[in-house]
Amino acid sequence: MDQKQKTHDKFIEFVITQKCNYKCEYCVEGNRDKGNLNEFNHASDKVVDEFIQLIRNLEGVWHISVLGGETLIHPRYMEVYQEIINNNHTTRLITNFSLPLEKYKELVDIAGDKLQILCASLHLSQVKSLDDFIEKADEFNKYKNSKTKFGVLSVLTEENFEILKEIKQRLAERSVNLGFQTYKVNQKEVFEYSDKIKEYFKQENRKVNPHGVLAQSTFGTICYSGYDGFIVLEDGQVMRCYNRSQELFTLGNIIGGNYKLFKKPIPCLAQKCNCPLFPSLNMLEYDNVDIELAKALVEFSQISKKAVSEINGLTGLNLKIKN
């Protein structure tokens, strides 16, 4: 892996919903209940309104990813999508591809080349007809803007390895790439695949962990998340990245504009990276490490939390650290 910092786009990921119409056995977001979509949260109208205002206030061009859950089942997704395009930003979409083909064609018609990526997730246990899925992928690939990258992604398990190889070949015959998504144990650690699968990836000149960061410590490595990139959850919470185990991962909430980004890039404060998003966007400076600053930030954050907790215990107040 090239360890040198490359240029990166400014990036926002908005989790507009946790609801999904599928119930995948390996879902990294947790178990889904097809019969009870209300079990998981949609972004409220308030959160969506605030996010739309955020889009309108952005300076320069940002790449904005909106996802779920299944993104397209949120009733206001198309409104957010239109705002992204109207304000001259670019976007991407990850979808389980379960809606009618005409809906995906509509996305192309609205965005043109501003839809930079559309990734269709293939879940073998959920699709009614594999042939229909492949045919839809073929038709969309022919319809999309020539500058839009389109591919299919499927979670690789020991059980589905052979059939996914066959599907990969069928899609390749239609000029559509099938990528393998690594399976995570307990939603964090990359699954230890068999030697057979490892050998396949070796022959294909690929890695099971393509960005190489999920198995190594990134503590102290300068990262642009929280500065040039951030995540907004369906409740409006703004996060530096998906690694909740580190200090200073939460930056506030978009409701009322109650959040602040870092004034400059700061070190990763997680002992181990389990969020490949920002490394994949070239936001980690692998040759720029400041362990002492990382330790100081962790210590300061922990001391601040302890002090506030002790004050609340002595006074009965409910003071909180302002982000």
Image: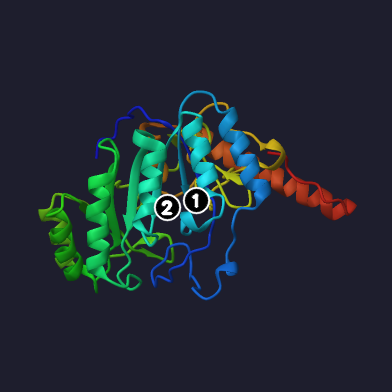
User: Element type at marker 2?
Assistant: loop
Viewer-proximal residue, 67 or 111? 111
Colouring: rainbow
Residue type of the residue flagged with mark 1: Asn
Residue position for label 1: 243
Q: Identify which residue, 269 or 150, lies in the foreground.
A: 150
Residue at (68, 47) in percent of width and height: 46
Circles 2 and 1, Cβ within 8 Å, touching? The answer is yes
The one nearer the camera, 294 or 61, is 61
| Mark number, residue 201 | none
Residue 48 shown left or right of residue 28 in the figure: right
Residue at the (10%, 54%) spot, across then down: 203
Query: Alpha-carbon neighbours of circle 2 within 10 Å: few (<14), some, or many (≥20)?
Result: many
Where residue 52 sits: x, y (%)? Answer: 59, 38
Q: Quadrant of residue 257?
A: top right
Query: Residue 107: x percent and y percent?
Result: 40, 45
Q: Quadrant of the C terminus?
A: top right
Looking at the image, is 89 positioned above or below residue 49? above
**Left/right of residue 236 with respect to residue 162 in the rendered view:** right
Say few, some or many: other residues with alpha carbon within 10 Å of mark 1 (under 14 / 14 to 19 / 20 or more).
Answer: some
Instruction: Check disc 1 and report its element: helix, strand or loop.
Output: loop
Q: In 3D space, how far apart are the residues under numbered discs 2 and 1 (Cα atoms)?
A: 6 Å
- The residue most toward the top is 60
The amino acid at mark 2 is Asn
Nearer to the camera, 57 or 99: 99
Q: Which residue is mark 2?
A: 274
- Where residue 167 appears, x then y in whole percent? 18, 63
Q: Residue at x 23, y 61 (%)?
A: 134
Q: Residue at x 60, y 28 (%)?
A: 57
Q: What x and y, as percent, mark residue 154?
A: 29, 61
Can I make out residue 217 in this image? no
